Image: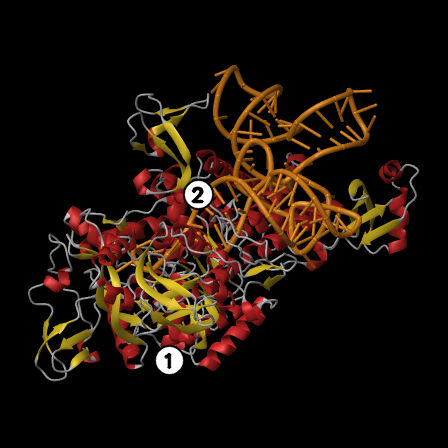
Amino acid sequence: MASERYNPRESEARWQKIWDEKRVFETRNDDPRPKYYVLEMFPYPSGKIHIGHGRNYVMGDVVARYKRAKGHNVLHPMGWDAFGLPAENAAIEKKVHPKEWTYENIATMKEQLKLLGLSIDWTREVATCDPEYYSKQQKLFVEFLDAGLIERRTSLVNWDPVDNTVLANEQVIDGRGWRSGAPVEKRELAQWFFKITDYAQELLDAIDALDDWPDKVRLMQRNWIGRSEGLRFSFAMESADGSPADDPLVVYTTRHDTIFGASFCAVSPDHPLARKLGETDEGLEAFRRECAALGTSEEVIERAEKKGYATGLYAVHPFRPNVKLPVYVANFVLMGYGEGAIFGCPAHDQRDLDFARKYDLPVIPVVAPLDTDPASFTVGDEAFVDKDGVAVVLINSDFLDGMSVPEAKEEIANRMDAAGIGTRKVNFRLRDWGISRQRYWGAPIPVIHCDACGIVPVPEADLPVRLPDDATFDKPGNPLDRHPTWKHVDCPACGAKARRETDTMDTFVDSSWYFARFCSPRDEDVVDRSAVDDWLPVDQYIGGIEHAVLHLLYSRFFMRAMKKTGYTDIEEPFRGLFTQGMITHETYRDTSGQWLLPEEVKHRDDGTVVRASDGSPVTVGPPEKMSKSKKNVVSPEAIVETFGVDAARWFMLSDTPPERDSEWTESGVEGAWRFVQRLWRLVGQVSELATPVGTPAPNEISPEALALRRVTHKALAAVSKDIEQLRFNRAIAHIYEVVNAVTALLADTSNGKVAPDLGWALREAGETIVRISAPMVPHLAEESWRVLGHENLLAEAHWPEVEPALLVEDTITLPVQVNGKRRDELIIARDADQSAIEAAALDLVGVQRALGDKPVRKIIVVPQRIVNVVA
RNA sequence: GCGGACGUGGCGGAACUGGUAGACGCAAGGGACUUAAAAUCCCUCGGAGGCAACUCCGUGCGGGUUCGAUUCCCGCCGUCCGCACCA
């Protein structure tokens, strides 16, 4: 009997214990049912979670529980992305060892996650900082190295000359190191690179087949890979006095059609030419230092004011030998793209135009709309960039005049090719993946540097290369490098004294294969091949849009690398991808500007917000992503204590579409809490009126019971579809609809009994509501299942079957428009033919009134949808 | 700067593939029950006009295509996200 209020505190803990004891969510690899792998991006153990972290786990859990009910063998694991910078910062700031800090955070967060009632197989838990995990990663590294997938070369990093350390882009603020405040320098370091560019074309092509990914992510990946078809060609060089200079300048362009609009050339500050000239030109060297202070972030470089330094050299125009283009070193030319050198055509590129205006260089339009007079076409402060659908033509361009852009490109490429100064070249924006980090808290790169043998991989028998626990964090720089003994080893090849690599791996390496490890998390080898081939790809991957490019692209590369090294046949790790929005919350500050926690403030009835302790005024800020620094966080513990986790889950899934940001509000959770209680009352009432469990379906059914069955099955069909499509907010709206219908029916039959056929339909309705709610509110559903007389676990029960016949009505309601405006509606037999519909529509009062005495010109009947009378 | 997305009542949002705009929820207002409160239940709820039937306007703004546009196209405005060493 369910006359009492539902007590989530008691019920939720009890069901979690039962699921645990019965190992309901543990997954066997030899289970014969069809597999389904659902995975949420694993968390970084930063400390405590707040309810905002819970949203994607809850979404994944709904899918996992639904698929389990649909008869799948579901893999739903969890682990920890446990290496990374914050642990090292904590070591410096709080004097806690990264290992200790990390494992304590993992313990805390695991307890918190368990409160959410997630159906996770915790026996498969992995932490990337565990030698058990990173030893396998080191083995992969060595094998990738052998397979030619990794190489070592130099690249530029942000260098803090005071702290003697490499800075991440986020640690560079206005060109200065975040801790030292010293101006950042660029420094060249030898680094390890994963050769992802070898797969650029393949990774690009395969995007087409990822049709269960959001289009925007696919587009972002395509743009990131950035394939372009262009021309690599060289300019002859001259000094200011016209004497020839030795080396030609090689540039890459995709707009060789605009060559007659060229008015300057520019090279990157890191270009060999700029370096060479800098050796003898102090002014240039100063300019190069200024550019270096911007750091390596592409964003910062591109947003900076366009500046250049004239080298005094000139490039000779390839088709007009008397035209000499001044050569600049320019801050907006990136060394990592193309040749690190460009020719500038200001009329048709905004950056070039900004630069030309600053240095008074000519702006010659060479592409214009088809119907424009070439003599009068000019470019002001906005470059003319031809867009799709606007016909353009070459002007002011000698032999190119009158050609289209593709024709002109073709002509230039042919001529340069023939002259031996240029070749067509496919270029990718994608760069190789630098994985070396000069930090302690990461997986050590398993190689040894020997003066005699060079670079020697650590033999498999010697793996893992463990991080030393006795590192120190009191000084800046890499703790592994200054450790007294760790790096001193004998060369595995020749036995001479040698040095370990002291760099560790980028944490993106850790997260590029964890989903594969989950398939056989305790395997002696990297993975158990049959387990990986069976489980992968992940059927539904869920995580933040911030990972749309890097993590997903690196993982796609890793699968291919693992295929090449013989670990799997799978190339694409994630069949389905979903990017969920964040949870936001208002922010609060007191009179002194300090952030306040939501529980420290009080919302008064008059709409004002005050500090709970002393009634002083509080400034309310707009909803922002929940973050510890702004204190706009709500803890799972507090929610579980007051409303129970089912209410929180329900609220997180309601209203806002899952891919959008969602605001956490007190009234919203209260609404969810009221629903939990309402469902509980409903189940109590149904259990009293419904026929007993196992009663056969009645032979005769009343219209009232049939109507209820229709409502039930429509909701079942709609909710099933919504969950399949991860439209949780719609699923919840449909549950409300069927609950409202049953509530209304119960209000009419409150006293006494109901007829057996209605009682039977009521049981079907009540049970269906409980079962379709179960993925969202699993504890309440489990409790309700008992109240309805069942002995088995709902978590193990099968999803109900839709009876398709109940979804089809005999009559339909067609809206009828006159000239596109709805004027009436027509209730008519589902199978009525066109002429019957037309006649009936014209007969309607609303249609007659709207028509007046205008003659009917046409009647459009869209079957099963709408009628439009055109007058 | 480059790339990507989004914009519908007081609020979150729904509307399948171009076919009844505002489902469902929150908030608000009114009422019932109660000694009272909580809880619960009922009613109203885009704007303007009208006793009413009903009419007109309305999906960021301005155009266009169409019998019909929140949906497609063009141009604006606004907000948010990513940019390679944060994860």
- Residue toward you, A395 or A183: A395
Q: Is A589 left or right of A536, judged from the image as shown?
A: left
Q: Can residue A131 be seen?
A: no
Q: Which residue is mark 1?
A: A564
| Measured Cα–Cα span from mark 2 to mark 1 | 45 Å
Q: Nearer the viewer, mark 2 or mark 1?
A: 1
Q: Is residue A226 above or below residue A645?
A: below
Determine which of the numbered discs, if any, sits on residue A547 in the image.
none
Q: Which residue sits furthest bottom?
A: A494
Q: Mark 2 belongs to which subunit?
A: A
Residue A687 pos. (x, y %): 57, 44
Mark 1 element type = helix
Residue A64 pos. (x, y %): 47, 59
Q: Is A333 left or right of A101, judged from the image as shown?
A: right
Q: Is A538 left or right of A824, judged from the image as shown?
A: left
Q: Which residue is mark 2?
A: A648
Q: Mark 1 belongs to which subunit?
A: A
Upstream in the sequence, badge 2 or badge 1? 1
Residue A7 pos. (x, y %): 43, 39
